[in-house]
Amino acid sequence: SNRGKSSRGVFLSGSAETMVVVEGAGHADAEVARQSLIRRWRRLSRHGIADAFEKNPARCRRLVLRGVPEDLRWEVWQAAVGSKKRYRPSQYRELLAQETTWSRLIELDAPRTFPDVAAFNSCYLESLRRVLRAYAVFNPTVGYCQGMNFVVGLLLLVSKRAEEEVFWVLLSLMEGCGLNGFYAEGFPVLRTYMLAFGRLFDNSVPDLARHFEQEGVQPTDFLHQWYLTLFVTSFPLPTVCILWDGILSCGLPLILSIAVSILRSMKHRLLCGSFEDILSFLRTLNKGVGSDADAVQLGRLLLRKSDTLEVPFKVRHGLPRISSCDNEDQYVEEDIEAS
């Protein structure tokens, strides 16, 4: 049988379209924990989430990794990347008043963004065009690259089209968290992350890494799409939102752990596959997950696995370090031991 089972409740069928996630803990215990977590977030919200991230970012990150209530997600994302500190009144309008040579490409790509998401209507499309144009004017060197449309599209959906706030979160992600290096000419940061992924994959799942090599599967065959859209086009949106809770709070290096955790969770299914089977499976992960509740559970599982995956110092060493949106304290103990 091609049915594989990974730890902690992810079942993968032999079909590339089927991925069912089941609760590991008892429903009663899970509900008690969920209510306790919601109360903690409510208390934090009353005192100011942005202040909490400023004063105790490590504590806030731990809370994020346990789960973010959907109605507080946008406030948490803004606080995690510090977008309100970048805000300059009238700057967004001033940027929109200028022309950019990237407009034609933005116009071409905009309608291809979330064509199957009913909520992403013509108003969202117009906001998407404006935010992308404003960023292209702000940073003409990066301008616009495919993939950015999905990043901005998700920000618009989660914020319920708070267009100007979305621009400042995008700016914080690109300029503060270093995401702009993924889209700059030559893809310098993307290349660095590809190499780091290869080292972490070999270190964490050596048997699957060998199988990929034997079948001729290159990480670039699936990683380009995963990384250029930060997983937006590869998983159901409820799953992606939870992955983004972690990425925005802990920093871009978490995408390495997420990518490896995805493959490790599906290892038994992937070890059975040929080149065509593997790529077909990895390119249809957003199909057939089931209900939104299953998609949420999948996101929680992957984020939990990513957080506990050990990333050796030699893997992180070559990554660009960005002070904003980068979880510095996560690595202190291991780095001391490594030195």
Image: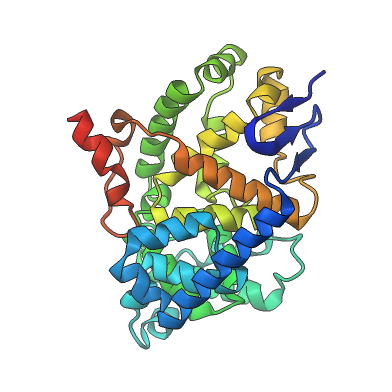
Q: Quadrant of residue 98?
A: bottom left
Residue extending furthest toward the left: 339
Q: Is residue 53 left or right of residue 218?
A: left
Q: Quadrant of the N terminus?
A: top right
Residue in the picture at 52% in, 50% down = 230
Residue 261 image point, x, y percent: 54, 35
Residue in the picture at 52% in, 38% down = 259
Residue in the picture at 72% in, 31% down = 280
Residue extending furthest toward the top: 214
Q: Quadrant of residue 56?
A: bottom left
Residue 295 image point, x, y percent: 70, 51
Choose between 221 and 161: the one closer to the eye.
Answer: 161
Can residue 18 be seen here? yes
Position above or below: 106 against 190? below
Position above or below: 316 against 62? above
Q: Is residue 1 left or right of residue 333?
A: right
Residue in the picture at 59% in, 63% down = 154
Choose between 286 and 66: the one closer to the eye.
Answer: 66
Position above or below: 288 against 169? above
Position above or below: 88 against 196? below
Can residue 144 be seen here? no
Q: Quadrant of the C terminus?
A: top left
Residue 115 image point, x, y percent: 73, 61
